[in-house]
């Protein structure tokens, strides 16, 4: 739950971006429109940076920033495939934000769960209290 909120906060910065970068997503199915692919590439590149730079992930998981970003990118690919229908053909600020909420919530939840399952969670009062991370 905490990471879903973190993802939403982070996505507020990137959901409307549509610039290309070198990141290649591994979406299955028919090709996306160029605008949709640009949106996916932008969010795929930026979201892991924002999530892994958030205090929750930095303070509550014993992992390097690089490992966190790599896992967040892997989770992004899974979430984008699971929620492919949420990716708009022609992203607008509104549709990009909606897609970002769906995919970003998925990425945040899955990243948190994956890092916890790998034994990297710092189980303490601060990290276990969602009120510490809701800003």
Image (tube, helix red, strand yellow):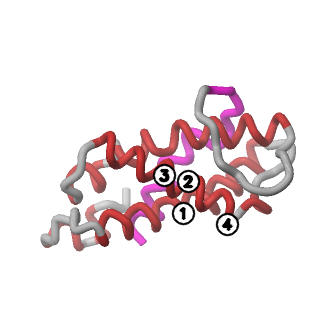
Mark 4 in CB contact with mark 2 (< 8 angstroms): no
Mark 4 or 3: in front is 4
Q: Are marks 1 and 2 in contact (CB under 8 Å)?
A: no
For the point 59% across and 34% down, the residue is 23
**Residue labelled with disc 3:** 9
**Mark 1 neighbour density, 10 Å: few (under 14) some (14–19) many (20 or more):** many
Q: The C terminus lies in which quarter of the figure?
A: bottom left
Judging by the rendered image, the residue that carries numbered circle 4 is 82
Sequence-first tag of 1 and 4: 4
User: Which residue reaches farthest left?
Assistant: 124
- Magenta-tinted stretch: 1-21
In 3D space, how far apart are the residues under numbered discs 4 and 2 (Cα atoms)?
10 Å
Q: Which mark is residue 105?
A: 1
Badge 3: how crowded within 10 Å, few (<14), some, or many (20+)?
A: some
Q: Nearer the viewer, mark 1 or mark 2?
A: 2
Residue 83 placed where, x, y %?
70, 64
- For label 4, the crowd category at 10 Å Cα-Cα, with few meaning under 14, some 14 to 19 and many 20 or more, is some
Q: Quadrant of residue 32?
A: top right
**Measured Cα–Cα span from mark 1 to mark 2:** 10 Å
- Which label's residue is closer to the chain start, 2 or 3? 3
Q: Nearer the viewer, residue 14 or 115?
A: 115
CA separation in Å, label 1 and label 4: 12 Å
Q: Residues within 10 Å of mark 2 (few under 14, many from 20)?
A: many
Tell me the mark number nearer the camera, choosing from 1 and 4: 4
Where is mark 2, residue-wise? 76
């Amino acid at each position: 739950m905490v990471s879903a909120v973190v993802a939403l906060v982070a996505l507020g910065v990137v959901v409307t971006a549509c610039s290309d970068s070198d990141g290649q997503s591994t979406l299955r199915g028919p090709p996306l429109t160029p605008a949709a692919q640009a949106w996916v590439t932008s969010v795929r590149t930026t979201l892991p940076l924002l999530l892994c730079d958030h205090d929750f992930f930095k303070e509550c998981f014993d992992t390097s920033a690089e490992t966190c970003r790599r896992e967040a990118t892997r989770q992004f690919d899974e979430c984008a495939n699971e929620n492919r229908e949420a990716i708009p053909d022609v992203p607008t600020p509104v549709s990009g934000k909606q897609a970002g909420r769906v995919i970003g919530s998925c990425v945040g939840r899955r990243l948190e769960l994956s890092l916890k399952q790998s034994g990297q969670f710092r189980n303490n009062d601060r990290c276990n209290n969602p009120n510490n991370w809701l800003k």
